[in-house]
Amino acid sequence: MPSFQTKLKITGLKPGNAPESVMAAAVEALESRHHVESNQLDIVGGVPQLSLRFTVDDRDYLGENHEARTSAAMMRDAVERVALTGSLYVLRRSRGRWSPV
């Protein structure tokens, strides 16, 4: 199964939401379609960034990439219900390296 990673910058919380609701929304959205292998919160240049690693079912290379991008966009939509977001990145693991999709 191909492994993907999505990175999403968080620029603020929407009123009435706890900080932990951001990661919960991200994981819940991705888990509805894929197996989530790991998740973490990093601070990159002073900005919080969610990183979630997940697998996509085997199929053709372009189809796998499309599914990963679509799922990452769905995850961002879910997170935007509780937080303000910035840049979204989708990466694919290939030969021990992460490459942009």
Image (cartoon, rainbow, N blue to C red):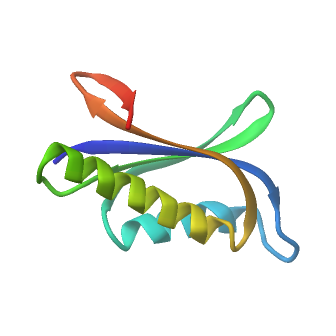
> Closer to the camera, 62 or 19?
62
Residue at far left of view? 59
Asked if residue 58 lies left or right of residue 18, the reply is left
Asked if residue 72 lies left or right of residue 47, the reply is left
Tell me what residue is drawn at x 72 percent, y 43 percent. 48
> Closer to the camera, 12 or 24?
12
Q: Is residue 23 visible?
A: yes
Residue 16 pos. (x, y %)? 85, 77
**Image quadrant for the C terminus?**
top left
Residue 96 pos. (x, y %)? 26, 22
Tell me what residue is drawn at x 37 percent, y 28 percent. 99
Q: Is residue 24 visible?
A: no
Query: Hey, which quadrant is residue 31 in on the image?
Result: bottom left
Relative to 76, say whether 29 is above or below. below
Residue 34 pos. (x, y %)? 30, 63
Residue 19 pos. (x, y %)? 75, 62
Relative to 24, say whether 58 is above or below. above
Tell me what residue is drawn at x 78 percent, y 69 percent. 18
Tell me what residue is drawn at x 72 percent, y 71 percent. 82
> Closer to the camera, 39 or 77?
77
Asked if residue 57 lies left or right of residue 73, the reply is left
Residue at far right of view? 15
> Number of labelled discs?
0
Residue at far bottom of view? 16
Relative to 67, say whether 7 is above or below. above
